[in-house]
């Protein structure tokens, strides 16, 4: 009886307590689709374009035929520069040996714009390297000598190494290479200061034939890096036969021409390069 009375009292007390209020709901913002402008803002930005690695196109202007004299480091340069789109170099090789057909560059160049001595030859008068004239091959490919590291394509007017050259109807192997874009050349001698004949090229359409009055190979190479020819960016230079073989003639028909640069006690050579208009 006592237990029943206690239970009844406890139930009455609980019924008098206030009931717990239901939890309030937390309002949520309405979910709406983003506007077009908002969508554009949250888009991933487009990737940046990589920088172009293509080489710049050659300049459309033509390089004029020009003879001039300049000086650098006590070296006098006589040069004839031109545009390879308008001119070519003909390889004039004397099949029967040095001096059998022409005694000088002036004699070889008659009727043309200019002439300069060509590549090296053996004591017997044979070409020291490959020579191609009018599609006819003479001599043999020089695969090892320092004097055959470069090759002139006279028809297309390019300078190449012997590892990268292509056949042409007018080809002359010579050396050493004096300046070669992107390459560090070694082995150039700093002895035997003498007259030099050589070819220059900017790698595009500007080409030139040049005589230097006296320099070692190393001195000449270092001076060419300093760009001694006005208005000509020399990126490639190939040495021709030098010393007593040096012989350079520019026709009086050329602006600034009427020039002959011939070594003292000059000796006959095996071949010449003749400048012709295309």
Image (cartoon, grey):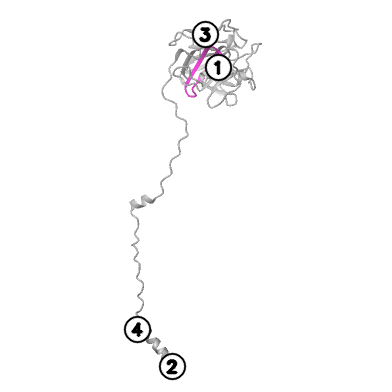
Q: Give the mark, 4 or 3, whose residue is nearer the N terminus.
A: 4
Q: Main secondary structure of the magenta part?
A: strand
Q: Give the mark, 4 or 1, whose residue is nearer the N terminus.
A: 4
Q: Give the mark, 1 or 3, whose residue is nearer the N terminus.
A: 1
108 relative to 188, above or below: above
Is 208 placed left or right of 245 in the picture? left
Residue in the foreground of this view, choosing between 9 and 190: 9
Tag in front: 4 or 1: 4
Give the structural element (helix, strand or loop) at label 3.
strand
Q: Which disc, if any, is residue 2?
A: 2
Which residue carries the number 3 mark? 261
Which residue lies most toward the bottom here?
1
> Mark 4: few, some, or many residues within 10 Å (few <14, many ≥20)?
few
Q: Tell whether position 215 is magenta.
A: yes
Q: Tell whether position 264 is magenta.
A: no
The quadrant of the rendering that contains the N terminus is bottom left
Q: Which disc, if any, is residue 16?
A: 4
Write the start and end of the magenta stretch as one range. 196-221
Q: CA distance from mark 4 to mark 3?
A: 130 Å
Q: Are marks 3 and 2 in contact (CB under 8 Å)?
A: no
Residue 218 coordinates in the image, percent (x, y): 57, 18
Which residue lies most toward the top here?
265
């Amino acid at each position: 009886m006592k237990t029943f009375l206690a239970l009844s009292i406890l139930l009455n007390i609980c019924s008098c307590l206030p009931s717990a209020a239901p939890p309030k709901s937390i309002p949520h913002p309405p979910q709406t689709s983003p506007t077009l402008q908002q969508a554009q803002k949250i888009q991933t930005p487009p990737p940046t374009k990589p920088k172009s690695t293509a080489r710049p196109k050659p300049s459309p202007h033509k390089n004029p035929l020009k003879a001039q004299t300049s000086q650098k480091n006590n070296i006098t340069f006589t040069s004839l520069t031109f545009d390879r789109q308008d001119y070519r170099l003909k390889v004039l090789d004397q099949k029967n040996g040095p001096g059998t057909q022409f005694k000088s560059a002036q004699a070889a160049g008659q009727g043309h714009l200019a002439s300069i001595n060509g590549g090296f030859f053996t004591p017997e008068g044979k070409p020291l390297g490959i020579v191609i004239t009018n599609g006819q091959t003479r001599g043999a490919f020089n695969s090892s000598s320092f004097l055959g590291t470069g090759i002139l394509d006279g028809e297309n007017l390019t300078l190449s190494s012997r590892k990268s050259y292509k056949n042409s109807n007018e080809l002359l192997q010579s050396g050493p290479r004096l300046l070669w874009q992107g390459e560090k050349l070694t082995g150039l001698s700093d002895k035997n200061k003498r007259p030099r004949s050589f070819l220059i090229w900017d790698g595009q359409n500007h080409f030139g034939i040049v005589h230097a009055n006296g320099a070692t190979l190393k001195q000449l190479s270092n001076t060419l890096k300093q760009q001694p020819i006005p208005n000509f960016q020399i990126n490639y230079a190939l040495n021709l036969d030098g010393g007593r073989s040096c012989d350079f003639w520019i026709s009086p028909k050329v602006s600034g021409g009427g020039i002959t640069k011939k070594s003292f006690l000059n000796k006959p050579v095996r071949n010449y390069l003749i400048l012709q208009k295309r």
